[in-house]
Image (cartoon, rainbow, N blue to C red):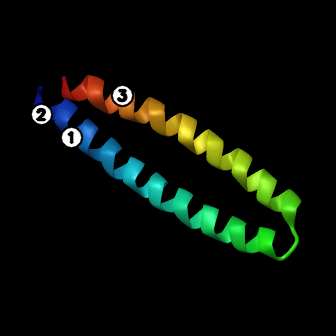
Amino acid sequence: MDEKATIIADTLELLMMNQTALRAALEEVSLWVSQRGSTQIHDNVLSALSMLDAHAEGISSGIERLRS
Protein backbone atom coordinates (compact mmCIF):
# COMPACT_ATOMS: atom_id res chain seq x y z
CA MET A 1 0.00 0.00 0.00
CA ASP A 2 1.37 3.39 -0.88
CA GLU A 3 1.75 6.23 1.60
CA LYS A 4 -1.22 8.22 0.29
CA ALA A 5 -3.58 5.24 0.63
CA THR A 6 -2.30 4.61 4.16
CA ILE A 7 -2.96 8.22 5.15
CA ILE A 8 -6.45 8.10 3.66
CA ALA A 9 -7.26 4.78 5.35
CA ASP A 10 -5.96 6.03 8.71
CA THR A 11 -7.98 9.23 8.41
CA LEU A 12 -11.14 7.35 7.45
CA GLU A 13 -10.63 5.00 10.37
CA LEU A 14 -10.41 7.95 12.79
CA LEU A 15 -13.55 9.48 11.28
CA MET A 16 -15.35 6.16 11.66
CA MET A 17 -14.30 5.95 15.31
CA ASN A 18 -15.74 9.44 15.82
CA GLN A 19 -18.92 8.37 14.05
CA THR A 20 -19.22 5.35 16.33
CA ALA A 21 -18.77 7.51 19.43
CA LEU A 22 -21.36 10.02 18.22
CA ARG A 23 -23.75 7.18 17.44
CA ALA A 24 -23.42 5.82 20.98
CA ALA A 25 -23.99 9.26 22.49
CA LEU A 26 -27.06 9.89 20.32
CA GLU A 27 -28.47 6.52 21.28
CA GLU A 28 -28.04 7.32 24.99
CA VAL A 29 -29.76 10.69 24.63
CA SER A 30 -32.51 9.12 22.53
CA LEU A 31 -33.22 6.50 25.18
CA TRP A 32 -33.33 9.22 27.84
CA VAL A 33 -35.79 11.23 25.72
CA SER A 34 -37.91 8.12 25.08
CA GLN A 35 -38.14 7.37 28.80
CA ARG A 36 -39.61 10.84 29.25
CA GLY A 37 -42.38 10.22 26.75
CA SER A 38 -41.02 11.60 23.48
CA THR A 39 -41.25 8.39 21.52
CA GLN A 40 -41.54 10.12 18.14
CA ILE A 41 -38.19 11.86 18.67
CA HIS A 42 -36.71 8.54 19.75
CA ASP A 43 -38.01 6.92 16.54
CA ASN A 44 -36.53 9.74 14.44
CA VAL A 45 -33.15 9.31 16.12
CA LEU A 46 -33.28 5.55 15.53
CA SER A 47 -33.84 6.22 11.82
CA ALA A 48 -30.79 8.49 11.75
CA LEU A 49 -28.77 5.88 13.63
CA SER A 50 -29.64 3.23 11.07
CA MET A 51 -28.29 5.55 8.36
CA LEU A 52 -25.06 5.93 10.35
CA ASP A 53 -24.83 2.13 10.55
CA ALA A 54 -25.30 1.80 6.80
CA HIS A 55 -22.64 4.41 6.11
CA ALA A 56 -20.26 2.75 8.59
CA GLU A 57 -20.42 -0.44 6.53
CA GLY A 58 -19.44 1.49 3.40
CA ILE A 59 -16.61 3.26 5.20
CA SER A 60 -15.31 -0.04 6.56
CA SER A 61 -15.39 -1.53 3.10
CA GLY A 62 -13.48 1.45 1.68
CA ILE A 63 -10.86 1.19 4.41
CA GLU A 64 -10.37 -2.50 3.70
CA ARG A 65 -9.95 -1.81 -0.03
CA LEU A 66 -7.39 0.92 0.66
CA ARG A 67 -5.43 -1.35 2.99
CA SER A 68 -5.34 -4.29 0.56
Q: Position of residue 63 (x, y in %)?
A: 31, 32
- Under mark 1, the amino acid is Ile
For the C terminus, the quadrant is top left
Question: Seen in the image, is 68 located left or right of residue 53?
Answer: left
Name which of mark 3 and mark 2 comes first in the sequence.
Answer: 2
Other-residue count near label 3 (Cα within 10 Å), few / some / many at <14 / 14–19 / ≥20: some
Front-most of 11 and 51? Answer: 51
Question: Seen in the image, is 16 located left or right of residue 45?
Answer: left
Q: Position of residue 20 (x, y in %)?
A: 46, 54
Tell me which residue sits at (78%, 60%) in the image: 42
Q: Are marks 1 and 2 in contact (CB under 8 Å)?
A: yes
Front-most of 7 and 54? Answer: 54
- Under mark 2, the amino acid is Glu
Tell me which residue sits at (73%, 55%) in the image: 45
Q: Identify the mark at residue 16; answer none if there is no mark.
A: none
For the N terminus, the quadrant is top left
Question: Seen in the image, is 38 located left or right of residue 23?
Answer: right
Q: Position of residue 43 (x, y in %)?
A: 80, 53
Residue 46 in the image: above or below residue 36: above
What is the distance, in whole Å, between disc 1 and disc 2 at their CAs?
6 Å
Residue receiving disc 2: 3
Q: Identify the mark at residue 62; answer none if there is no mark.
A: 3
Mark 3 vs mark 1: give the one in front: 3
Tell me which residue sits at (79%, 52%) in the image: 44
Tell me which residue sits at (28%, 23%) in the image: 65
Name which of mark 3 and mark 1 comes first in the sequence.
Answer: 1
